[in-house]
Image (cartoon, helix red, strand yellow):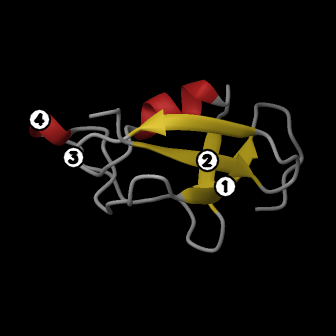
Amino acid sequence: MGSVTVTLKVVASGHCETQQLVEGRLDWPTVEKAFNARVVRIEGSGSPPLYHQGGLAGLTRCTFEAGAEIPVCVERAGDLCRL
């Protein structure tokens, strides 16, 4: 069985990053690192709620389906961003 992934696509540029799911959830610090971003927000939803303790720390509370394309807005240090 192949890895379970989703594609995150930056709305402004079309740049895509593929990220592995952990039990259907995204490791959000890894997402931010992949985009070299200060903040990554899901378009229309904002920043996803995260687990902060235990074995799921850093993972999104919401789950995603394998193969989904998720539109995101990315803010890097120094960006003048309209999120």
- Location of residue 59 in the rendering, given as x and y in whole percent from the top left corner: 30, 44
**Given contact means CB atoms under 8 Å apart, are the residues at marks 1 and 2 in contact?**
yes
Give the amino acid at mark 4: Gly
- Tag 1 residue: 72
Observer-nearest of 35 and 76: 35
First in sequence: mark 2 or mark 3?
2
Q: Give the residue at mark 4.
A: 55
Q: Residue at x 32, y 51 (%)?
A: 50
SS state under label 2: strand
Give the camera-side residue of 30 and 64.
64
Helix, strand or loop at label 4? It is helix
| Residue 69, position as x, y percentages in the image | 59, 57
x then y, percent, for residue 79: 86, 39
Crowd band around label 4 with a 10 angstrom C-alpha radius: few (<14), some (14–19), many (20+):
few
Quadrant for the C terminus, please: bottom right
Query: Tag on residue 23?
Result: 3
Q: Check disc 2 and report the residue beneath it.
A: 8
